[in-house]
Amino acid sequence: MKFNTITYSVMGILLRQPRTGYDVVKDLKSFRPAKSSQIYPILANLEKAGHARVELAPQTGRPDKKIYELTDSGKALLLNWLDTEPEPPVTRDDFLSMLFSVWAKGPAAAVRLLTKRKDYLTQYEKDVVARHDSLLSLDSGECVDPGKARFSSRLLYRRRIRLVAEELRWCEESLHELQEFIDI
Amino acid sequence: MKFNTITYSVMGILLRQPRTGYDVVKDLKSFRPAKSSQIYPILANLEKAGHARVELAPQTGRPDKKIYELTDSGKALLLNWLDTEPEPPVTRDDFLSMLFSVWAKGPAAAVRLLTKRKDYLTQYEKDVVARHDSLLSLDSGECVDPGKARFSSRLLYRRRIRLVAEELRWCEESLHELQEFIDI
DNA sequence: AATAACATGTAAACAGTTACATGATTAC
DNA sequence: GTAATCATGTAACTGTTTACATGTTATT
């Protein structure tokens, strides 16, 4: 059976700890967002293929929890995937398409667009920094041990923070450049 | 009629100059990549809706060129879109999913993964810088005029260059951190 | 001689989102 | 009392890629 790449991301969550579908969706948010309607079938497929097993936790008033756990074959499959060539990243960002055409609307429109982006990034930066800080506060020792899951998480957060900060600098530089065309 | 966001990216290309479907695919590559099988129907729809008109350029030995040009209604629609709220950007990047799980494979695997990324980014940086430079060499005056299309292009290239450079710094920093776990 | 670029498009498959179905519990 | 969170999933729709169909011309 051939799996798509999001399946490996799901396995990456289960490698760290047994999780429900609902949990997996939350955990994926930071590096590979997906809707629950996409995740539930993936978990079912993993179980059918023997790469995950399920434990049922009965609940009252809401659907019973299905706690998924990675099997040895699942773990082996995931670790194997790490040696394959990752496909080049793809980004879809309306802001870039808007910027591409904003010249036709004049400098004021460009300023509006870039200011909106700056606000978005500022908020985003705050969120990521907060999550990064709370990760470090949990157990700063684990975060620097490359054999621990939190090491990976820390690297990912740090990357995000750096990139967002750099795009903010770019926004400000671009806005600064546009100033002279607005004021005069 | 309601259009999806890639349609606006296509209109953004046509706003700059009349183009064939083949050309549009090439032009989109830098900020909103898409396959030709997705673009041809979009162009046909734009024409049907009256937002683009087609001029036929007969050729021998290969299909006649269909040169699309944006109409006034198309231009108005595009400029209107620039005032709407862009949806938050989404990125799909296998490398991030691999990094998320690489802790389970140990520091040497992490070094391999990051080195591969570094190589990819180094090549990518070279490409973008080259395209940025060739843009500047064409007409450096237009590039600083926010009423000209090349101003938008220059901003987009500069953003890419900055972000790639920042991710390269992050790679190197992370690799440096991993060194001590490998050598000893 | 082989490969890349030029040029159009359709059909099928895959990936991903939105809407639906269902409702208790918890926090404000 | 209102909104968010918890918890599962299916069906329909939209978006994107891959495979097919068909060749010529230019470059290496």
Image: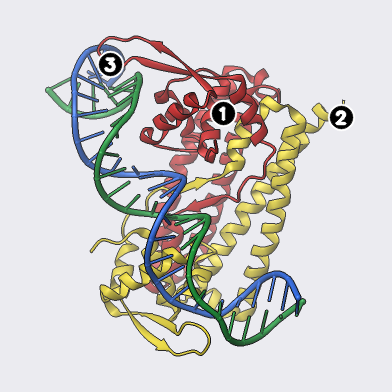
Chain colours: A red, B yellow, C blue, D green
Q: Considering only order in the chain, which callout, 3 or 1, is on the residue closer to the N terminus?
A: 1
Q: Amino acid type of disc 1?
A: Gly
Relative image position of residue C8 (x, y in whole percent)? 43, 76
Q: Are marks 1 and 2 in contact (CB under 8 Å)?
A: no
Residue A58: image quadrant is top left
Q: Which residue is mark 1?
A: A12
The picture places residue A161, in percent across and down from the top left corner, at 57, 40
Chain of the residue that carries numbered disc 1 in the rendered image: A
Alpha-carbon span between mark 3 and mark 2? 52 Å
- Residue A40 appearing in the image: yes
Residue A59 as seen in the image, left or right of residue B111: left
Which residue is painted at 49% across and 34% down in the image?
A30
Which of pointers 1 and 2 indicates the residue nearer the eye? 1
- For label 3, the residue is A62
**Same subunit: marks 1 and 2:** no
Which of these two is toward me, A79 or A145? Answer: A79
Disc 3 is placed on an element classified as loop
Task: State the residue at coordinates (58%, 36%).
Answer: B97
The label shown at residue B183 is 2
Q: Nearer the viewer, residue A15 or A182?
A: A15
Mark 3 Cα shell of 10 Å, populated few (<14), some (14-19), many (≥20)? few
Instruction: Report which quarter residue A9 is drawn in.
Output: top right
Residue at left offset 72%, top offset 34%: B110
Q: How many angstroms separate mark 1 from mark 2 (CA)?
A: 27 Å
Whether B142 is drawn above or below A137: the answer is below
Position of residue D14 relative to residue B147, above or below, is: above
Q: Secondary structure at mark 1?
A: helix
Using the image, determine if residue A50 lies above or below residue D10.
above
Q: Amino acid at mark 2?
A: Asp
